[in-house]
Amino acid sequence: MKAIEDLVSLLTRLPGLGRKSALRIAYSLLKSDISFSEALAERIRTLRATIHFCPECGSYCESELCQVCSDAARDRSIVCVVEQPQDVITIEASKEFRGLYHVLGGLLSPLEGVGPDHLNIGKLIQRIQKSLPTSVPIQEVVIATNPTIEGDTTALYLKKLLEKEPVRVTRLATGIPVGGDLEYADRLTLARSFRGRSSL
C-alpha cells in the first residue's frame, strides 16, 4: 500500500528507526484514535515554528532566550561547550552543572568537509571577549565533546584557540563508568582512566 510505504520511507529517515520499527509505528497509527493522529500531525507541523535556537548559546528554546541563559542564578563565569542542543538536556538532567552552555552545532570533521567556519566557534570567542569588561567575566570553558576522534580533534582545536584568551580550559573526565567491570573496558578507556586518575 503506497500510503503506508510513503510513511515508512519518511520514518526510516529518522535516527535509530529501521524499516521494522517504522512499520510498527505506521500500523500503530492506523489502529489509534483519529484524534491522536491529528494531534501528533499538528505537533510535528508546529514544532519548527515554535522551537528555535537561542541567540546566546545555540540551544533549543521557545522564548527569546533559553531557560539557562535567562536564569539569573546561573554561574556566568563558566561555560560548558557541547556538540548539540540535546547535550544540554543530558547535562542538565545530572543537576551537577550550574554554569552556562555554548552549542557548537557539530564537530570538526575534515573528511566530511566540516571545518571551524561551519561551527559556532567564532561566537564562543565573541562571548568570552564580550564578558571580559563585565562584572562576571567568563573564567573557565569546559569542553564536553564526545570522546571520539572528531570530539578530541575539536577539543584540541578549541584548547589551542582559547590559549589567546584569559580563560582556564578544562575537559570532562573520561574513563570507566560507574558499575562497569575492568574486564569489559577497552584499552583506550583504560588508558584515559589512568591518565585522568585523581586522589582519594
Image (tube, rainbow, N blue to C red):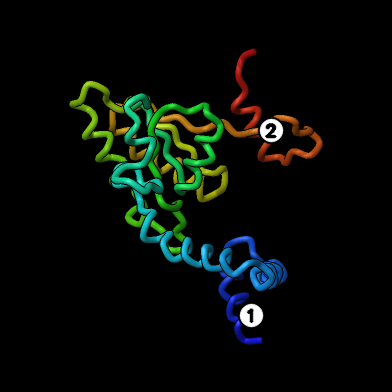
**What residue is pinned by disc 1?**
4
Rate crowding at label 1 as few (under 14), some (14 to 19) or many (20 or more) other CA atoms within 10 Å: some
Residue at horizontal 40%, vertical 29%?
A: 99
Quadrant in which the C terminus is drawn? top right
SS at circle 1: helix
Is residue 155 toward the left or the right of residue 138 in the image? right
Which amino acid lies under the numbered mark 1 shown in the image of this protein?
Ile
Q: Is residue 66 above or below residue 139?
A: below
Which amino acid lies under the numbered mark 2 shown in the image of this protein?
Ile
Is residue 19 toward the left or the right of residue 71 in the image? right
- Gap between marks 2 and 1 measured at Cα: 44 Å
Residue at horizontal 59%, vertical 27%?
A: 196
Q: Is residue 5 above or below residue 183?
A: below
Q: Nearer the viewer, mark 2 or mark 1?
A: 1
| Lower sequence index among marks 2 and 1 | 1
Give the label on residue 13, or none.
none
**What residue is pinned by disc 2?**
176
How many numbered markers are drawn?
2
Residue 121 at x, y percent in the picture: 33, 46
Q: Quadrant of residue 18?
A: bottom right
Q: Is residue 53 above or below residue 82?
A: below
Residue 147 at x, y percent in the picture: 57, 42
Is residue 183 toward the left or the right of residue 35 in the image? right
